[in-house]
Image: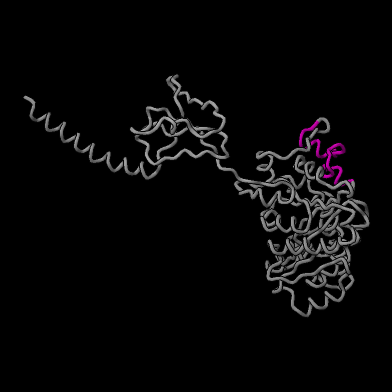
Amino acid sequence: MWKWSNYLHTHVPATKQALHINIDETSVKVEMDVRYGHVSNNAKKLEKNNSLRRRMSKSRQRTAYSFVAVLCDVEEVQRVLPQFIVVNGKQCTKAVYNALQERRPDNIVLWRRSSAWLNVLTVCHVLRDIHRSLSAFLSTYQVILCMDSCKTHINPKVWQACSRLGFMMYPIPPKTTAILQPLDIYVFAQLKQSLRHAYQTSCIDIAASSCTLGMSVLLLMEVVPKVLLSRCWRPAFEHLGHVGNQHDLSKKVHQSMSLTEAPCIPATFPTLVDLANCFPRGYDIDVESVFKGLVHITSRVPTVGAAPLLRSVRDVSARIADLTIAAVVPSEALPSGASSSASAGPACPVRPMPLRRLPSGRTVLPLPAIPLADRRLSEKTAAPKAAVSKRLKTSSATSAP
């Protein structure tokens, strides 16, 4: 991941600065404290026979919605970045949704969808709104995004949306978000702790034992600006190595990765092994979508180093790509009546053909594989020949005295 990040920083134009943005979503439960009511710690110690527990259905306990946080390392940009709340349309009625829309702050975006979980289309809409809010800063900053390797985040449509909007993006490897993702380490725990405190205070003020969905969303709208705008998040990106170098890694990162000193990570194009480590296991990487706009990927026809040398291999043509290797056919392999000029090959520099070493130690010229049609034909013709030879063997054995 660090090599990928360093490589993207080398493509930042000289007239712009890198703007580091981290995007991630978290689930927010409507009932923050399911087990206990609003009691003191001394009362919890005196609990007997579950007398202090509240009765609540499982559907009520599982009611939740998604909060999509957007974090950057520049304070003035952080003030205009949108934060997203996604609620389920079955849990949030139109009347509640309209009331929340009237009371939401300008930097909060509230969506009412068929599901509170994010999908690929929702992630693309998040990127679109971020680009719209950064219209006044795009001439000064080059956006470099980082998101975890959830399959919703690394879908080819998301990479194409980033390329279309002019964003650079790289994923955070699986199972490392607790070490390398700024939102998971510095924001979400503090945010939910503040939300839990506001939730308990509100329930005590209105003398209620639980909270509604609309009330929970309103509390989140009040807590988000206080947490995200309370400090500068530049050190969070520096301590995790997201700023194009890894000179200021935190002690926790050093301990988690068993590092004794700051690593020296090159800013080169990531290898195939590096890419595989940044994506989930077994994921098919669409390299063209991932690096669209950065590198130009072309496909070449593989070169052929030798022509067929056996007469049993039929209808096989040696194709030379870009006239880089000449196929030379010995005169013994040519059919009768062929001219000697046909065996000279095309007019291009002739390179020695690589030899293949057999297990016995003998070296031979490499031969192309037999075509599938000829292979099936040989299998069909081999069966009658084997049957005839077996019949001849049995007849000779019975006629012998």
69 to 322, vertically: above or below:
below
Position of residue 272 measured from the top left corner of the image (x, y, whole percent): 65, 40
38 to 73, vertically: above or below:
below
Q: Quadrant of the N terminus?
A: top right
Residue 253 vs residue 387: left or right? right
- Residue 397, picture quadrant: top left
55 to 316, vertically: above or below:
below
Would residue 247 be counted in the magenta stretch? Answer: yes
Residue 39 visible in the snapshot: no
Residue at 81% in and 30% down: 260
Would residue 199 be counted in the magenta stretch? Answer: no
Position of residue 142 measured from the top left corner of the image (x, y, whole percent): 84, 52
Q: In the image shown, does 193 or 93 lie closer to the viewer?
A: 93
283 to 220, vertically: above or below:
above
Q: In the image shown, does 297 or 319 lie closer to the viewer?
A: 319
Q: Count the marks: how many?
A: 0
Residue at 69% in and 64% down: 121
Magenta residues span 235-259
Q: In the image shown, does 167 or 117 lie closer to the viewer?
A: 167
Residue at 9% in and 30% down: 398
Position of residue 368 measured from the top left corner of the image (x, y, whole percent): 44, 35
